[in-house]
Amino acid sequence: NIPVISGDSIYLASSEGSISSLSLETGKNNWSKSTDDYISGSTGFGYKTIFYGTLDGQVVALEEKNGSEIWRVQLSSEVLAPPVTDGALVVVQTADGKISAIDLKNGELKWVFISKVPRLSLRGTSTPLLSRGVVFAGFANGKAAMISSESGSPRWELPIIINEGKSELERIVDIDGKAILDGNMYVVASYQGNIASINISSGRPIWQEKFSTIRDLAKARSTIVGVNNESIIIGFGQSTGVTLWKQEGLKLRKLSSPVNLRGRIAVGDFEGFIHFLEAKSGSFIGRVKISNKPIDEIVAFSNKLLVRDKSGRVVLLSVD
């Protein structure tokens, strides 16, 4: 589960059902709460409300101050990605390919968008982006969509790759990583597929390149950074899709998703190292070992990194 930062607090959830609020400055516990839920998706946060999804398809909203439950709603399938909110709606993607919009105030289900899921897919879903009155989402069938947040009707839906594999395994083209929304461009990548930049006004690709990942994308200035399935880190030009650099020095080290920290890219590996690269060139500029366990998630903010390892241990790093 990805830690969530708001103000001077960190919110953490465990798969066994515990929710905690920690002081960002000291790491001390503000409050903790045990639930009867099996939490399957990362925690979401917004507008003084904490959200999480469960294995049995429920979405739960909690008060920021003390973790008291506000509402819960039953959806059609397991929630594997963090819910997102814009202050009016909470948008959730479930494992069966549906996007559900819930009223933030009362938990009322407003609409459901349905995308057909292949018989065989990876375990995971991408995190929707909710902005400018629309929802951007990627699906297990390799399609990306822009959906009206008011009605749930699609503005456009298009494939990032045409499914041409000979076997069912070769035809897995899930979009599982978090995409990038910047200006009029929506950049998204799929497993065994492509990375593509889409013009959100027309719904047409601006550029498209062969690329396979299940990790989130990162943006540093005019470079889109992705980690492929072999843990090779690649920097793509945002406007053209041209490969600006390729860093193979961490190949097969089971890297985390990359994050941008003031023009530097940080990634974690399976031995507990955090590696730092120059975003402009992809060259190494440092590394630090913070754990004996694999690094699961990194969150970047200000000049700090919040890192969670496989055991659930959380470390705050200050980077000069």
Image (cartoon, helix red, strand yellow):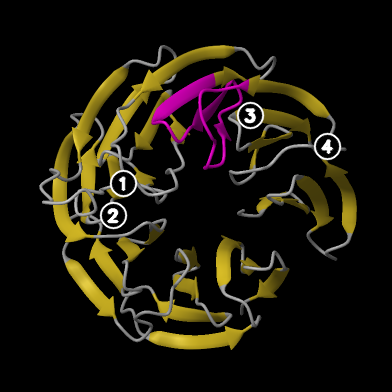
At which x and y percent is residue 251? 34, 81
Image point (52%, 12%), residue name: 110
Q: Residue at x 13, y 51 (%)?
A: 165
Pick the front one: 124 or 307 = 124
* Real-space CA distance between mark 4 and mark 3, rounded to the nearest whole angstrom: 14 Å
Determine whether 288 is above or below 140 in the image: below
Q: Position of residue 235 (x, y in %)?
A: 28, 68
User: Is 95 placed left or right of 13 in the picture?
Assistant: left
Q: Mark 1 and mark 2: span between their CA atoms?
A: 5 Å
**Mark 3 lies on residue:** 59
Q: Is residue 305 magenta?
A: no
Q: Are marks 1 and 3 in contact (CB under 8 Å)?
A: no
**Of the residues tagged 1 and 4, which is closer to the observer?**
1
The type of residue carrying mark 4 is: Gly
The CA span between labels 1 and 3 is 23 Å
- Which type of secondary structure does the marked residue at label 4 adopt? loop
Q: Which mark is drawn over residue 191?
A: 2
Per the image, the residue denoted by label 1 is: 174
Residue 150 location, quadrant: top left
Of the pair 295 and 265, the residue shown nearer to us: 295
Gap between marks 1 and 4 measured at Cα: 34 Å
**What residue did someone put label 4 on?**
67
> Which residue is at the front of the view, 300 or 39?
39
Q: Is residue 241 visible?
A: no
Q: Residue at x 24, y 76 (%)?
A: 245
Q: Given contact means CB atoms under 8 Å apart, are the residues at marks 4 and 3 in contact?
A: no
Which kind of residue does numbered mark 2 sit on? Tyr
Whether label 1 touches label 2, CB < 8 Å: yes
Mark 2 vs mark 4, CA separation in Å? 36 Å
Region rendered in magenta = 74-101
